[in-house]
Amino acid sequence: MSAFSVTEPSSRTKWGAGILVVAYALITIVPLLWIIATGFKSPTDSIAYPPKVLFEPTLEGYVNLFTDRTRATQDMLDRAGPPQTWYEVIVRKRGTIITGTSRYGERFLNSVIIGFGSTFLCMVLGTAAAYAFSRFRVPLKDDLLFFILSTRMMPPIAVAIPIFLMFRQLGLSDTHLGMILLYTAVNLSLSVWLLKGFIDEIPIEYEEAALIDGYTRFQAFYKVVLPQAATGIASTAIFCLIFAWNEYAFAVLLTSGTAQTAPPFIPTIIGVAGKDWPAVAAGATLFLVPVMVFTILLRKHLLRGITFGAVRK
C-alpha cells in the first residue's frame, strides 16, 4: 500500500486545481489580449463582423491616439506636400492631415502624478498610523479603527456632491493637489488596516532590543520596523495605486481640463468618422503599462506580503 497523507493533496486534486487555474487565467486574459490586438487593427477590422482574429497589423490606432486630424480636400493635400514621416503616410491614406497633437499625453501624465503621488502620501500616513495603532495604547482604538474602515464602505456617489461643493469653495477643483488629497483620503483606510496587520506580525522584541542599544523610537521604527514591513508596504502600495489609477467617478466630476486623468479621457476619443476603436484600445493598452511594470517590480514583495503571517511559529 502507498502511504497516505492528510496534508498532501492527491494527484487528482492537483490536476483539478491546475485545470481550474489555467481556465481562470485564460478567461481573464482573453479580453486583455483582445484589447491589445484591437489597438493594432484598422478601424474597419476593429468593427468587422464576425470579429477578425487574423488581420494585417497597423499602427494607425496609436497614430490617431496621439494626433488630431481633419478631413482634407485634394487642394489641401497638394498644398501640404508629400508626407515626411511614417505616421503622416498612415494618416494620408485616410484622406486626412494632422492638425496637432492630442491631449492623451497630458492626461496620461496627470494619471502618473496623481496616482503615484496619492500612493506615496497614503503609504507615509498609513504606515505612521498603523504603527501607532499597533504599538501604542490609543484611547478608543477599536472604535477609531472601525470608523476608519467605515469610510471605505461608503459608495463614492454618496459623497460626490458634498466633495464637489467643498472643492469648489477651497479652489481644489481640477487641480493635481485636490485629486491627490482625495485619493489619499479614500485609500487611507485600506492602507491603515492592511499595514497594521503586517506590523502586528513583527515581534516587538526587535524594537525593544534596538531601544536598549540606544536607538530612539524613530530610529527603531525606521531601521527595524520598516525593513521588516517592506513586503506589506509593497502589497498595500499596489492596491492603493490600482484604485487611484483606475478611478473614474471622482475624476469625471472634479476634473475637466488641467488635472483630468486618462480614464475619463479615453472614452471621449473620437475619430473623423465616429468612434475610433483602435485608438481607444491603444490608449487602454498604454494605460495598463505603468501599473503592470510597478506590479512586476514589486512582485516578490507582493507574493511574500500576501502570505506574511499566514503561519505562526
Image (spheres, rainbow, N blue to C red):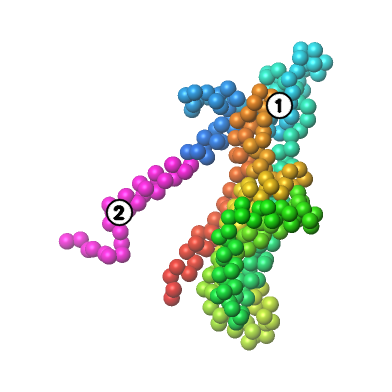
Local secondary structure at mark 1: helix
Q: Residue at x 82, y 15 (%)?
A: 79
Q: Position of residue 111 (x, y in %)?
A: 69, 48
| Location of residue 246 with respect to 284 vertically, above or below | below
Q: Earlier in the sequence, mark 2 or mark 1?
A: 2
Q: Count the marks.
A: 2
Q: Which residues are magenta?
A: 1-29
| Mark 2 lies on residue | 13
Question: Looking at the rendered structure, which numbered label has been put on residue 87?
Answer: 1
Q: Position of residue 33 (x, y in %)?
A: 52, 37
Q: Position of residue 159 (x, y in %)?
A: 64, 56
Question: Looking at the rendered structure, which numbered label has been put on residue 193?
Answer: none
Q: Residue at x 79, y 56 (%)?
A: 169
| Location of residue 297 with respect to 76 vertically, above or below | below
Q: Amino acid at mark 1?
A: Tyr
Q: Residue at x 73, y 26 (%)?
A: 69
Disc 1 residue crowd, few under 14, some 14–19, many 20+, Cα 10 Å: some
Residue nearest the viewer, comparing 29 with 82: 29
Q: Left or right: 190 with respect to 268?
A: left
